[in-house]
Image (tube, coloured by chain):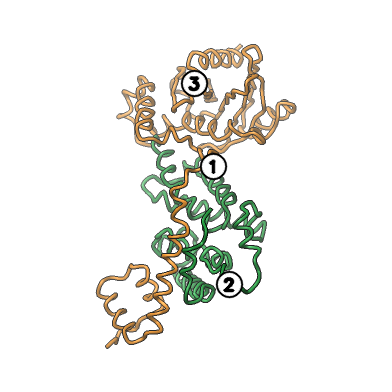
Amino acid sequence: MSRQIVTEADLHAYVDGVLPLGRAAEVEAYLAERPEEAARLAAYREQKAALRREFDPVLDEPPPSRLRVPRPAWLRPLARYAAMVAWFALGGVIGWQLNAYTSEQRAEATSWPRQAAIAHVVYSPEVRHPVEVGADQEKHLVTWLSKRLGTPLKVPHLGELGYTLVGGRLLPGDRGPVAQFMYQDAKGQRLTLYVRVNRDDSRETAFRFAEESRVGVFYWIDRKLGYALSGEVDRSELLRIATAVYRQLNP
Amino acid sequence: MSDLAGSIEQHIPRLRRYARALTGDRAAADDLVQDTLERALSRFHLWRRGSDLRAWLFTIMHNIFVNQARSRMRYPHEPFDEPAAAALQYREPDWSEWRDIGVALAKLPVEQRTVVLLVGLEQFTYEEAARVLDVPIGTIMSRLSRARERLRALLGGDFRSAALKVVK
């Protein structure tokens, strides 16, 4: 009865349930006459079932803490919504004007501090490799990152505030290389300073604050560079440190 | 942008499932997921809004896995997971106790394993699998065919005992 040519691809599509109904009927007619082929396809179907039995339980395993990248607290819809509201609300004037922006600009207006927060979350829990170049090679670190960002960088010293430099690393940003400096206090609390080149320097230079769950970010634009200081410390403490960073960079 | 982290997070369970099946090793799989997440987060500006995020993440994972496999040429990477390692070190032809899908998968060449998992476990369409693996759809079909036939040979006619395998 099966005048249509049934190909190997048709048989797999039949197993995977992606054949159009009419074609599936033709394949069934074809199989009805060929019990060996029908048995082979039954084995394939059983393979799929076995894969699901074997590996579906992984879906229900709680991910290990190291896969909390990004942090789970961000991921709860409510927290996400709150974070989104915070981004827009704290964007102040920009927030009111967002509708006038193109969507690209809008993404741009919110994305880089968020990238800074993500980079903080990714690297600050690192025990063995928090930085690429340690503070013991600070001169090299600054030279290297300045060269890669194409502009001279300065690394602030926060010893008076109890934070020592751990080191830094190079990160990819949406406009090219980004630098991240990491600091740590005596208790191991870490802060990161994310520095990127700002190409359209005409826009605002205000100090802004955003928070993603427990990670607070103070960010500002200073001439050619955008800075974002991230940490899981309270806002007033973070502001104090951000102010110190700003002053050191603008003596 | 604001919901991107959340969107990525939704895919973590499936990334873990695929990675576990691909590597056969819990720790190696989670390493792979971690590498994938880090790369995705650092490159999310390259993700085209509106395109299929799941396919994009799996593509990243596939590329990382292939590069790592190339540099190690060994499967799995290291015997982190004792039961999996014991199974993989098993070389005797007595299949009666080891006839399970995980062990059979480990015997497939990587290019066949990825196809059979993307299609059979992750429910990717053939077109999506072709994009993730960056090969023509004809290649997907021939790999799928070879993989399923190989698994059938490895598993024999009756592998339902796999369901009785002691878990933990």
- Camera-near label (2 vs 3) is 2
Say whether residue A209 is left or right of residue A21. Answer: right
Chain under disc 1: B
Residue assigned mark 3: A218
Q: Position of residue B113 (x, y in %)?
A: 52, 65
SS state under label 2:
loop
Residue assigned mark 1: B38
SS state under label 3:
strand
In the image, what residue type sits under mark 3? Phe
Q: Position of residue A241 (x, y in %)?
A: 56, 15
Colour in which chain A is drawn: orange
Rounded to the nearest angstrom, the CA distance separating label 2 from label 3 is 61 Å
Characterize the local packing of mark 2: few (<14), some (14-19) or many (20 or more) Cα atoms within 10 angstroms.
Answer: some
Using the rendered view, name the quadrant where residue A119 is placed.
top right
- Is A186 above or below relative to B26? above
- Camera-near label (1 vs 3) is 1
SS state under label 1:
helix
- Camera-near label (2 vs 1) is 2
In the image, what residue type sits under mark 1? Glu
Q: Which mark is residue B95?
A: 2
Chain under disc 2: B
